[in-house]
Image (spheres, rainbow, N blue to C red):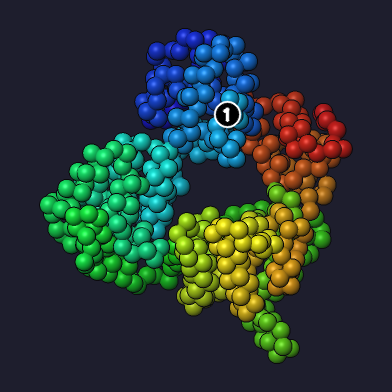
Amino acid sequence: MNLNLVKILNVSKRKNVFIKPPKTGVINDVMKEFELNRDEAVLFSVVAKLSFETGYSQSLRNIRDKYKLSDKLYMDIIKNINTLQKKNLIVIEKARRASLNVNPEVELDEGIFNYLVTGKDSFSECNFSDMYSILDFAKDLIDQRDEEKISLKQFYNKVEKLIEKMDKKLDIYHILIQYPTIEKIMLFYAIIEHLTGRGDTYLSRFSDDIFDSLSDIANLNSKFVNNELKIIKDKVLELVKDSDLLNDPEFKLAEKTVRKLFASKNKKKNEKEFSSTVLDFTKYKSIKNNIYLNKKNEKDVSLIENSINYKNFNRVKKELKQSGFKSGFVALFYGEAGTGKTASAHVLSTKTKRHILQVDISRIQDMWVGNSEKNMKKIFDDYRRAKKEFKREPILLFNEADALIGKRINISSSVDSMNNAMQNILLEELENFEGIFIATTNLIENMDNAFSRRFLFKIEFEKPDINARTLIWKDKLKTLEEKDYTNLSEHKLTGAQIENISKKFLLNSVFNKNKADLSNLTDLVNEEIKFKKEKGISNIGF
């Protein structure tokens, strides 16, 4: 179903929408799409409206005042907010730091917002011809189910939809299609455990992640004990030898399944991919980034580009080694958010024709003792493997690496111990690193001195100057007049802020079914300035 955002916005304008929820139309569509009751669907629609109109989170108190709600209705809304959060439809700002209170800040989940605006659902980010992209998506679904963000019914439906969308040529599709939903989920689970190095899976742990009720857990246990699971009879999964079948059996991928899924296959040269459980692989040809920097930043990035350019790279490495220096290129890009740090890494990728292997910090941190450290080591093991597989050494990108390069702390918990251990491994790897490493951070003040000396390049990214801002505005909004670009570029916004303003300006044009006027753009600029609380920037006008 493709929900009509305009209708959602219109129905949410009614001041009595909470008191007399509509019983037909778009509210019914919202109820059906997200499995909500009528009151929850109304609240979702109101949050969607406010998120779209402002682009920022809203306090429930503002909603109460705007719709003139009684105390009883307001308390009902607080209860319903919890349901919307669990279903991953909204984000509660204060819930990230503390328990739900009587006036939380709420906003629409970014993925849901994109779905409403573009009509593309959460599956749009999955590459259905790539097994590892599919497994990443399945892992996200399992995590959402474990955290009760989606119901069991939604979970089952999404798993089946995921399999339905798969490329029918994939081996994993032909294995999965034979089995009922819960056995398909067991296979996904076992593959993920295999790839993350855990291997065997206790049935109790699997059941705890998936099921709500004891009856579902008991039913699956019974099928194990009575050998009623087809996926085990077919030896796609197998019981772990000597596991306690009656109390808590263990299962894992059968050896033949491992061979079928992961045995290397010859690929055409131009189809070469790289798979890793700890690194995201991005081909340089798939990156499309325009970037406009200050002259100093341009010069700094250009030096790195010339150093790692394919024509110069090997010669520069050789000369460094002959002079007694380490030959690795280790760079730190630091500065305020939105100033072009990550975009510059992407531009280096495209200009030097080097693929990017990017680290997702949240993915390598693991609750299980020792696994985070293993993941950190695996990052560099996989990078060394990638260097052998590709003609040109790829770029290893640690994006938003604040947590990893900050000052080490006194150990007061297992989490502190894990973070320090990960930092020590990173320091050891960088000491003798051979390749191209880029880290980005917003918080340079907190960087550990041990990391500072390991970065050959330390580039501070400043806000774009007036010339760069003019080029960014021209790149994002191509239909304005020259005088408009001149006025806009006077205001000290980052590239990310300009992009946000431009996107909202275009969205307003789409939904107003006409070209948004410049007064609307003026309002958007002033809203962004006010939100960022940047002193010394006056309001603008055309």
Among all residues in the image, which is located at the extreme bottom? 322
Q: Is residue 59 above or below residue 404?
A: above
Which residue is label 1 attached to?
Answer: 101
State the image coordinates of residue 185 (x, y, percent, origin top left).
29, 49
- Circle 1 Cα neighbour tier, 10 Å, few/some/many (<14 / 14–19 / ≥20): few
Q: Which image quarter: residue 236? A: bottom left
Among all residues in the image, which is located at the extreme right? 536
State the image coordinates of residue 503 (x, y, percent, origin top left).
63, 37
Can residue 331 be seen in this snapshot? yes
State the image coordinates of residue 405 (x, y, percent, origin top left).
66, 63
Q: Which image quarter: residue 23? A: top left
Residue at x 22% of width, y 60% of height:
244
Residue type highlighted by circle 1 = Asn
Q: Is residue 117 above or below residue 230?
A: above
Residue at x 75% of width, y 38% of height:
532
Residue at x 51% of width, y 14% of height:
73
Q: Nearer the viewer, residue 406 or 25?
A: 406
Residue at x 18% of width, y 62% of height:
235
Among all residues in the image, which is located at the extreme front? 412
Q: Nearer the viewer, residue 518 or 362?
A: 362
